[in-house]
Amino acid sequence: MSFAANYLKRIYVKRTPEANKTIHVLSSAFKAEFSWHNMRTLQECREACGGQGLKTENRVGHLKSEHDVQSTFEGDNNVLMQQVSKAIIAEYVAAQRRKKPFKGLGLEHMNDPSPVIPPHLTSTILRSNQFQTAIFCLRERDLLIRFAAEVSQHQTRGESKEYAFILSYQLAEDLARAFTEKAILQTVIETEMTLSDGPLKMGCLNISLIK
C-alpha cells in the first residue's frame, strides 16, 4: 500500500486542475482502504497473542484505539467509498450517453472486450502482470455494470437517483473496493516495471500475488 500512497503523493505534488477529480477519488479510496487494513492487521495481531493481545507491553490495544478513529476521521469510510462509486458510475453513464470511449479514473479497460480467463491456470500465468491486471479489471467491470443496472432499475420504479444509490449501497461499496484494490495493484506493477531483476523486484512480485 505504500506504493499507492507514494503514487498519490506524486500526482498531488504535480497536480493540475484536470487531475483534481482523480486526486479526490483516489484519496477517498485509499484513506478508507488503508485505515480498514490497519484495523484488520491489528486484529490479527491481537488474536495471534491470545489472551495477552491487549496487554500493555504488546502495544496492540494502544494502537487499536489510536487507529480505530481513522475509520471516521476526515470522513466516514463507508461514505467515502460511496463517493468513489458515484464518481465511477458518473463516468460510466457519461461515456454511455456520449457514446465515446472511457477516459480517466483507470476505466480505460472498459473500452476493450471483457478479459477471458484461461481454462488452465499455471504458476506462470498466475504470476504474470497481465493475468493479475485482467482479473482485477474483470471484477471492477462486472460490479460496475451490475451497480449501474441496479441503480437504473430503482430509478425506473420511481426512486430518485440519490435514494437509488442508497438502496444499492452494498454494490456501491463492493465496486469502490474493487476500484481501490485494482488501483493499488497497478501501483505495485508500475513500481516493479521500473526495477531491475533482483530481491526488490521479487518482493514487489510477491506483494502483487498476496494482494
Image (spheres, rainbow, N blue to C red):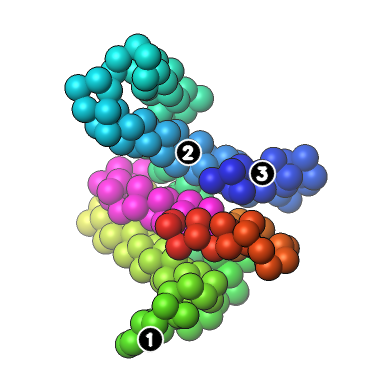
Secondary structure at badge 1 equals loop
Q: Is 46 located above or below residue 22 in the figure?
A: above
Disc 3 target residue: 6
Front-most of 163 and 110?
A: 110
Query: In the drawing, what numbered circle is on residue 118?
Result: 1
Please identify the quarter of the rendering in which residue 194 is found: bottom right
Q: What is the chief secondary structure element of the magenta stretch?
A: helix
Q: Is 85 located above or below residue 186 in the figure?
A: above
**Hey, what amino acid is under mark 3?**
Asn
Report the span colored magenta: 162-185
Residue 180 visible in the current orientation: yes
Q: Position of residue 137 (x, y in %)?
A: 46, 68
Disc 2 target residue: 34
Secondary structure at badge 2 equals helix
Q: Position of residue 21 (x, y in %)?
A: 63, 46
Q: Residue at x 52, y 42 (%)?
A: 30
Please identify the quarter of the rendering in which residue 120 is found: bottom left
Front-most of 40 and 18?
A: 40
**Hey, what amino acid is under mark 2?**
Phe
